[in-house]
Image (cartoon, grey):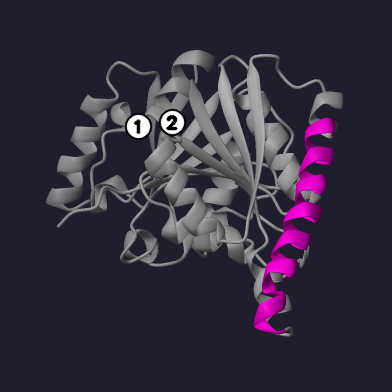
């Protein structure tokens, strides 16, 4: 059974991310873990009280967030969720990053899905700070970033952005290939730049990708940079009716190493299209 973690702060955006993910995997039996961390509230409140009262604060926050979780599960039932999905709610005083990575390692979760903005709803925040932090700290599992304004559509066109400086076989990325096979999606490999400008190494990786995708419905697109890579990708998303965009995340240099700008953060702000972030393999 597929296992998916969906963090929540009980905001509308978090719930929208949950519903989108439920619809995306409606065809599959899934164990959803809806995870809430009250670490920030716990830290703030216990700094104001005696150490002896910290247990009381912990119990109060656990009780109140558990009730909110129960209401969330009831709301899901009212929204006619797929019958082959199973749900549990977990609340924790530890950080989301710690709990998520622990569940990936110990329970075999294969996807984390979360909203791009949190309860604050600050328009100037391109991608919620929590989501951005999870992007940087998640280990061994893809992260699906779902914008608040997304409406679910079958992902017929899935873009995969690359600069061809690295090669990561898409055929081995189950989070992508299972969707492609089920929905009959087309994979669009996107490079911001001119094919004629590719280096020898980039050309080798370009051929590696062509060979890797030979059995898939795919196309390779080169687009001229317009102001920035993220702006160029946004335009491409709209022009080619992209339903989902995927990016490789390089942990040590963040995404700046890949595109010389924080593309995950900026692409994650697209109002209508989810972003699937794939962690690059850790190399020694």
- Residue 21, percent across and down? 63, 32
Type of secondary structure dominating the magenta stretch: helix
Which stretch is magenta? 50-74
Taking the spot 81% from the left edge, 54% from the top edge, the residue there is: 64
Taking the spot 19% from the left edge, 34% from the top edge, the residue there is: 208
Q: Which residue is mark 1?
A: 173
> How many other residues sit within 10 Å of disc 2, few (<14), some (14-19) or many (≥20)?
some
Residue 280 versus residue 174 in the image, above or below: below
- Residue 238, percent across and down? 63, 41
Whether pointer 2 and pointer 1 mark residues with C-beta atoms closer than 8 Å, the reply is yes
Side of 161 where 4 appears, left or right: right
Taking the spot 68% from the left edge, 41% from the top edge, the residue there is: 17
- Residue 267, percent across and down? 55, 54
**Does the rendering let one see residue 260?**
yes
Asked if the magenta segment contains residue 266, the reply would be no
Towards the viewer: 237 or 137: 137
Residue 66 versus residue 49 in the image, above or below: above
Q: How far apart are the alpha carbons under marks 2 and 1?
A: 6 Å
Secondary structure found at label 1: loop
Residue extending farthest to the front is 52
Secondary structure found at label 2: helix
Q: Which residue is mark 2?
A: 175
The answer to which image quadrant residue 60 occupies is bottom right
Taking the spot 47% from the left edge, 57% from the top edge, the residue there is: 98
Towards the viewer: 77 or 277: 77
Asked if the magenta segment contains residue 51, the reply would be yes
**Does the rendering let one see residue 264?**
no
């Amino acid at each position: 059974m597929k296992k998916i973690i969906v963090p929540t702060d009980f905001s509308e955006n978090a719930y929208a991310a949950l519903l989108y993910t439920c619809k995306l995997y409606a065809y599959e039996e899934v164990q959803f873990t809806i995870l809430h961390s009250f670490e920030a509230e716990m830290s703030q409140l216990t700094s104001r009280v005696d150490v002896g009262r910290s247990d009381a604060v912990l119990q109060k926050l656990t009780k109140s967030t558990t009730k909110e979780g129960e209401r969330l599960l009831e709301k899901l039932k009212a929204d006619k969720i797929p019958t082959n999905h199973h749900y549990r709610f977990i609340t924790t005083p530890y950080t989301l990053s710690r709990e998520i990575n622990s569940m990936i390692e110990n329970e075999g979760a294969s996807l984390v899905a979360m909203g791009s903005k949190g309860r604050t709803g600050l328009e100037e925040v391109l991608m919620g700070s929590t989501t951005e932090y999870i992007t940087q700290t998640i280990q061994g599992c893809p992260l699906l970033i779902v914008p608040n304004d997304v409406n679910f559509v079958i992902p017929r066109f899935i873009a995969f952005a690359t600069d061809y400086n690295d090669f990561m076989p898409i055929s081995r990325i189950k989070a992508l290939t299972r969707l492609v096979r089920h929905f009959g999606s087309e994979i669009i490999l996107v490079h911001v730049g001119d094919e004629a400008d590719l280096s020898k190494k980039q050309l080798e990786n370009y051929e590696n990708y062509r060979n890797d995708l030979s059995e898939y419905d795919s196309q390779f697109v080169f687009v001229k940079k317009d102001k920035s890579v993220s702006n160029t990708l946004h335009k491409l998303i709209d022009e080619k009716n992209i339903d989902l965009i995927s990016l490789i995340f390089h942990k040590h240099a963040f995404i700046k190493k890949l595109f010389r700008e924080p593309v995950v953060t900026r692409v994650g702000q697209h109002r209508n299209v989810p972003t699937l972030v794939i962690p690059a393999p850790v190399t020694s």
